[in-house]
Image (cartoon, rainbow, N blue to C red):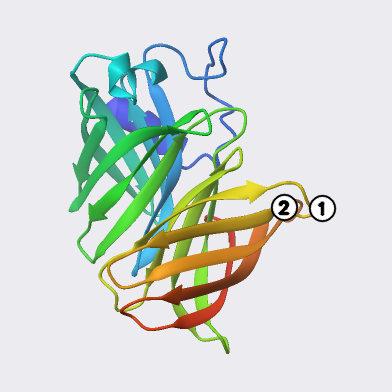
Amino acid sequence: MLAALALLAAFALSGCGKGKDIAYDKDGFPGPDQSNFQGVFASEGGVGRMGIVISASSSSLAPTRNAPAAAVSAIGALTLENGASVSLAGTYDTGSDSVHLNGAGYDFDGRSAWLGGVPMVTGTYASPGDDGAFAVALVNDFGPHRYCGRLYVTGGAPVGRLAYLVSGITILGAACFDAEADPVALQGELDRSTAKPRVDMAGTSATRDLSMHGAFDEEADLSAGSWTSTGAAGDASGTWSVDICP
């Protein structure tokens, strides 16, 4: 187990999802014994990179009809903004398509689904500081690529944190506003029909309905745009910007 965790920590720190060290099968997915995911986590207190390795083939993941109910081992690693790493361990249930990981006071729960032809896992977590949301996607030739940044109100003051992944054209992530307990889980798409691809994503929490739009600069590997929200938190708007997660 210690050797596996060491390997995973190296995997989680190895960049932004190019998948250079992963062995692929004929369909472009990792080999039959494990599924390797990369993505992001975000809370009001911070954002970072996340990796998960599930001891099952990608075909055993959601939807549930592909596999009988069974608990298989899963391990994970977080890379915090200060460069520190956190090791996680737990299980994946092929019957409920759910994953549970914990370690060092972090507790993650998520569900898997196929989006854009790729298995992805999204969910929430509790940590020693606050609560947040996460999203990871299976590593393949198209990503995922991981981005971290900030939310600003109109006028420039920072009001929250933002992290998301891009796998193909699928976008998953979370926006976390200051002093709000619930993160906004985000889902959207990258529109490549323009010279600079367009970023469109949206999500809902208990306090706001959030819509985000922007442009993606593939050469610089960063994106920025604007956001608007309505709901119990009040009508609001502002801007956002991200670059490669540290």
Give residue 6's position: percent from left, percent from top: 35, 32
Viewer-closest of 19 and 156: 156
Residue depicted at x 22% and y 58%:
127
Question: Would residue 208 appear left or right of 199 to someone viewing this image?
Answer: left
Tell me the element at label 2: loop
Q: Could you tell me the amino acid type at mark 2? A: Pro
Circle 1 is placed at which residue position?
A: 195
Residue depicted at x 37% and y 62%:
204
Q: Are marks 1 and 2 in contact (CB under 8 Å)?
A: no
Quadrant for residue 203, please give it: bottom left
- Tag 2: Cα neighbours inside 10 Å, few (<14), some, or many (≥20)? some
Image height of 63 relative to 44, above or below? above
Image height of 171 relative to 132, above or below? above
In the picture, the quarter occupied by the N terminus is: top left
Circle 2 is placed at which residue position?
A: 197
Residue depicted at x 54% and y 16%:
24
Q: Could you tell me the amino acid type at mark 1? A: Ala
